[in-house]
Amino acid sequence: MQITTTLSANPTDEARLAEILANPGFGVHFTDHMFTVEWTPERGWFDARITPYGPITLDPAAAVLHYAQETFEGMKAYRHDDGSTWLFRPEANAERMIRSSHRLALPVLEVDDFLQAVEELVRVDERWVPANPDGGEKSLYLRPFMFASEKFLGVRPSQHVTFMVIASPAGAYFKGGVKPVTLWLTEEYTRAGRGGMGAAKTGGNYASSLVAQQEAYAQGCDQVVFLDAQEGRYVEELGGMNMYFVFDDGSIVTPETGTILEGITRSSIIELAGKLGHTVTERRFGIEEWREGVTSGRITEIFACGTAAVVTPVGSLKTREGEVPAPASQDLTMRLREQLVGIQLGRADDTFGWMHRVATGA
């Protein structure tokens, strides 16, 4: 793509930026610039540009507001100790967005164009990538997204589509250290069924989880567990994370995909655990197997993963039939977490070739 760049006339001053990066939170502050490119059937992708961050204008009849035709990605840029900036498996995000676009009847943004858009925005706003001199886990969270921007009311794929990338500095997900999350089992709500949009990263999947997440909060829990829509027996995923179950023989089971999101952290954990000598099986995993496995001691650890939290141990599970206690151990969970975060932040060797350099920091 030919990208034009218009720099902000009023960039965040260094004192304010230092204040933000000292305590960025998550999704609260945004960088000085954003990337935009548009699409029509006649022109393909056109007018690629980086401009100052600011509100966008949408017609009240914009198709996305009425038919929810949109996809997005979540990824991070990391500052290594030598000052260089890196992305973690960005091509996997690009490939997943292509799969999501096919499911939502949106045009495909090719992998190279996706990477160029993300990289150029990171380079322009590189000073927003936090450093971690204290051994922390700060990063720059990147949100590429695509939506139906055509002024049109009618149920058909949009003939005008906009792709954008925005960025937001992010602190460590867990303040005060990693803590097990408590879970609530919803038996009323599901995320997606066979043939649905469960494997696409689209806002509708997250919207459908919110009422169940409210239910979890009301029960004093951190996250909600969804079961399959067909039989209501098999564990699928949490509101925003994939799950793993560790057995006493060292083997690991994770629910199979098809109706759940194919998480990039999820696939990375599968590879990393395999390299550490653990057999990882993707299969259907019943809620009764969870209960019985913890009770018998066969399940020794449970953990969840996602872009924001990376890896987190799972504590107790609350259900209408009673509580399933937390497994006894977190050893492998924390080992996997340390290895993955170490690779992302340049503290461990990247033997998988996952990291993608964006800027040297020189």
Image (spheres, rainbow, N blue to C red):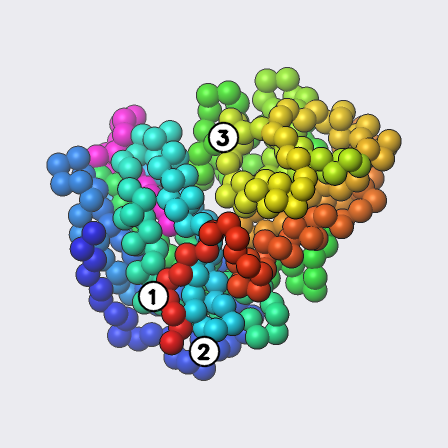
Q: Helix, strand, or loop for circle 1?
A: helix
The mark total stands at 3
Mark identifier at residue 123? 1
User: Residue 43 at what x, y percent from top left?
Assistant: 13, 41
Mark 3 highlights which residue? Answer: 198
Q: CA distance from mark 3 to mark 1?
A: 33 Å
Q: Secondary structure at mark 3?
A: loop
- What crowding class fits label 2: few (fewer than 14 Cα within 10 Å), some (14-19), or many (20 or more)? few
Q: Residue furthest right?
A: 296
* Mark 2, residue position: 16
Disc assigned to residue 113: none
Q: Quadrant of residue 42?
A: top left
Q: Secondary structure at mark 2?
A: helix
**Closer to us: 306 or 153:** 306
Place residue 56 in its image quadrant. bottom left
Near-viewer residue (95 or 13): 95
Residue at horizontal 70 percent and vertical 24 percent from the top: 286
Q: Can you give x and y, in whole percent of width and height, for residue 291 in the image?
A: 79, 30
Please name the residue shown 71% across and 35% down the image.
251
Q: Judge left or right: residue 90 versus residue 7.
A: right
Question: Residue at position x 39%, y 35% from top?
Answer: 100
| Tag 2: amino acid | Arg
N-terminal-most mark, 3 or 2:
2
Q: Quadrant of the C terminus?
A: bottom left
* Comes first in the chain, label 3 or label 1: 1
